[in-house]
């Protein structure tokens, strides 16, 4: 079940947050498996073409784009690169915090948090953005509709993969 109330709130003087959650009938371990495999050859599970387009735009302005992949398809460690992100924090089967390394008028993070027991889990996806100046705020509001679609689809795909766990994590 996807919780239908996205929250966007100014937190502090100049920070924005977008959060979604989904509850699924699966263990935290099953729910975290697709999260720890995200990026690289696995892709981003939803609208990969949008991720690639954003990466292309980033390269046009001198950034890193999205072509960096990841060092290992199944292991994650702080400091690892996952395409356009760097792993800032990792707690196995519980939390993954990614810091974006794209050229932005601010700083951004994408966090995945899984809470639950052996029967049900709630997957939280949170995007945080600290804008720099007016252009940072403009960027947040211009990209908000796309992020809303992108992150909702991403969370739905992660939830679906939790329910259809297999050893390769390749699904329909």
Image: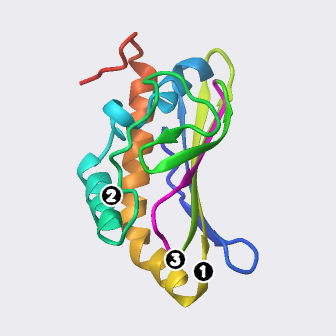
Residue visible at 66% across and 25% down in the picture: 92
The residue under label 2 is 55
x, y percentage for residue 110?
Answer: 56, 51
Disc 2 packing (10 Å; few <14; some 14–19; many ≥20): many
Callout 2: helix, strand or loop?
A: helix
First of labels 1, 2 by sequence position:
2
Residue 60 quadrant? bottom left
Q: Position of residue 36 (x, y in %)?
A: 52, 29
Looking at the rendering, the stretch of residues picked out in magenta corresponds to: 93-105
Q: In this picture, is 34 found above or below 87?
A: above
Quarter of the image where one finds residue 5:
bottom right
Q: Is residue 83 magenta?
A: no
Q: CA distance from mark 3 to mark 2?
A: 15 Å
Read off the residue under disc 1: 132
Pick the quarter of the image with the C terminus. top left
User: Sequence-wise, which precedes: disc 1 or disc 3?
Assistant: 3
Label disc, if present, on residue 105 of the rendered structure: 3
Vertical placement of residue 155 versus 24, above or below = below
Q: For the residue carrying disc 1, how many other residues have a C-alpha within 10 Å: few (<14), some (14-19), or many (20+)?
A: some
């Amino acid at each position: 079940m996807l919780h239908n109330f996205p929250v966007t709130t100014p937190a502090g003087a100049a920070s924005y947050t977008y959060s979604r959650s989904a509850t699924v009938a699966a263990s935290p371990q099953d729910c975290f498996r697709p999260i720890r495999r995200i990026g690289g050859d696995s892709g981003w599970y939803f609208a990969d073409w949008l991720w690639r387009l954003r990466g292309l735009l980033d390269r046009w302005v001198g950034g890193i784009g999205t072509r960096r992949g990841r060092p290992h398809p199944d292991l994650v460690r702080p400091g690892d690169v996952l395409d356009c992100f760097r792993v800032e924090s990792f707690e196995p089967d519980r939390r993954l915090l990614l810091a974006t390394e794209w050229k932005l008028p601010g700083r951004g993070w994408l966090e995945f948090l899984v809470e639950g027991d052996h029967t049900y889990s709630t997957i939280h996806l949170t995007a945080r953005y600290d804008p720099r100046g007016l252009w940072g705020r403009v960027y947040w509001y211009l990209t908000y509709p796309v992020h809303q679609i992108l992150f909702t689809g991403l969370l739905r795909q992660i939830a679906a993969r939790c329910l259809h766990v297999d050893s390769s994590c390749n699904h329909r």
